[in-house]
Image: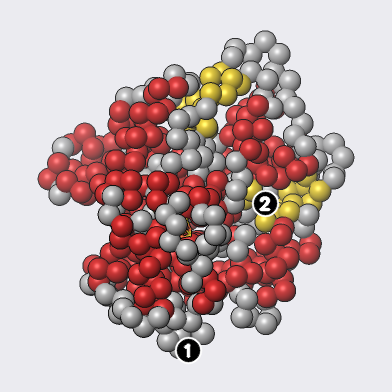
Amino acid sequence: MSTAVQSYLKDLDYSVVQQCMHCGMCLPTCPTYDATKIERNSPRGRIALMRAIADDRLEPTREFGEEMYFCLGCLACMTACPAGVNYAELFEHARAEVERVGVLNNPKRSLIRWFTVKWLFMDLRRLLLLGQVMRLYQQLGFQTLLRRSGVLKLLPRRLQELEAMTPQVQPKFSAELIAPVTPARGDTKYRVAMLVGCAQDLIFSDVNLDTVEVLARNGCEVITPPEQHCCGSLQAHNGELELARELARRNIDQFPPDQFDAIITNAGGCGSHLKHYSHLLAEDSRYAARAGLWDKKVKDIHEWLAQIGIQTPRVNGAAPLRVTYHESCHLTHGQKVTAQPRELLKSIPNVQLTELPESSWCCGSAGIYNIIQPEMANDLLDRKVKHIKSTGAQVVATGNPGCLLQVINGCKREGVDVRVVHPVTLLAEAYRKS
Ligand code: SF4
Ligand code: SF4
């Protein structure tokens, strides 16, 4: 398809392009419009630009490219839209068009994109190798030494900020923690596949282990192959639809959907993308039917547990735990999984759930948005941390690795003493105490 593409927006189904009726209901829910009050920075404004390109009234310019990358891709506008505009599809095609015409290209950007989007995340063995190098660097104390030495102060401010955001790499990755087959505890009721993710595996492999344990406790035999592929959301959200298709095919080949009751993900961002392989592969006669079944089988962990019924842990005598819940954009707006994480948290007897004000407002993580748009991302993070503080919670639970990292960094920066965890970790800990 790559050579046949004339324009990603002109080739897009016109019923998607012309869906917006300009009502403006999405405007108050859009974080970028909220920050600037400029129409161009709103969903309605962006859709008008996309349509103008599809209609041949506008060329994709550098300004258009910058606008598409100023959008968080948080999909809050989709939840608000009464007309059912498929902003996710418009957004992916608009970014693909920006990359096709190359209006944002420069040597530094091209090098970074080639290294990350096109090379590192296309083969997770490369990412894990990099993870092992980082792990050694951190475990042998080089990171601490460098930070204490003051050398980092010589770096430009932006690089210093990026260095401070470097996550702690886990002592063991999923393949070292999780057996390829984990039997159900008690009767086997379901056979499920577990997707370990990419960044998730490096930084939160403990959450993957917790997820597998929770699944086993709830009657699932869990299949977790040691070598897996990225879901492709990084590629799809950064204008590389052909690479995203390639990864979708690899995943469907590795996890034939007819062989599992469910294909489980615990990362909100990945799940939102994984559930749309049928859109991505609609034109691929070899994969389209399997992609349709795949979409139905992919389940976010909260969604799956709510569907099969959560075994209530018994934690008699445990001290009450004040927990608040931050909603990952792609879990909430992309997958509409909102009640199930709360249900999971409420199933833990000593958890006292306090609602977080603006719980579904983006925290600024948004994939790599906090790296490419630091100012806007920081403003959103400050707003989130302020709300977290107001709840007085001891624990913030959230179901996406990007949000976990962002909120951990924000709370650390503001000196807010809370533990930030995936909801499934709290459930796994409660089972262990049972
Ligand atoms: S995806 Fe988020 S930032 Fe982008 S237009 Fe929609 S609400 Fe605004
Ligand atoms: S709410 Fe939907 S139809 Fe209304 S302006 Fe926004 S995108 Fe268009």
Quarter where residue 195 is shown: bottom right
The residue sitting at the bottom extreme is 4
**Can I make out residue 142 in this image?**
no
Q: How is the image coloured?
A: secondary structure
Task: Judge from the rendering whether residue 410 lies leftward or rightward of residue 190; answer left or right.
Answer: left
Quarter where residue 225 is shown: bottom right
Q: Which residue is located at x 67 percent, y 10 percent?
A: 317
Vertical placement of 253 versus 84: above or below?
Answer: below
Q: Which residue is located at x 52 percent, y 27 percent?
A: 355
Residue 109 place in picture, x, y as percent: 27, 67
Task: Judge from the rendering whether residue 362 lies leftward or rightward of residue 281; answer left or right.
Answer: left
Vertical placement of 61 versus 259: above or below?
Answer: below
Q: Amino acid at mark 1?
A: Ala
Mark 1 — residue? 4
Q: Nearer the viewer, residue 339 or 100?
A: 339
**Can I make out residue 222 in this image?**
yes
Residue 297 place in picture, x, y as percent: 72, 58
Q: How many marks?
A: 2
Q: Quadrant of the C terminus?
A: top right
Calculate the distance from the C-alpha at mark 1 to the C-alpha at mark 2. Answer: 34 Å
- Determine crowd level at label 2: few under 14, some 14-19, many 20+ residues with C-alpha closer than 10 A: many
Pointer 1 or 2: first along the chain: 1
Q: Amino acid at mark 2?
A: Lys
Mark 2 — residue? 299
Tell me the SS state at disc 2.
Answer: strand
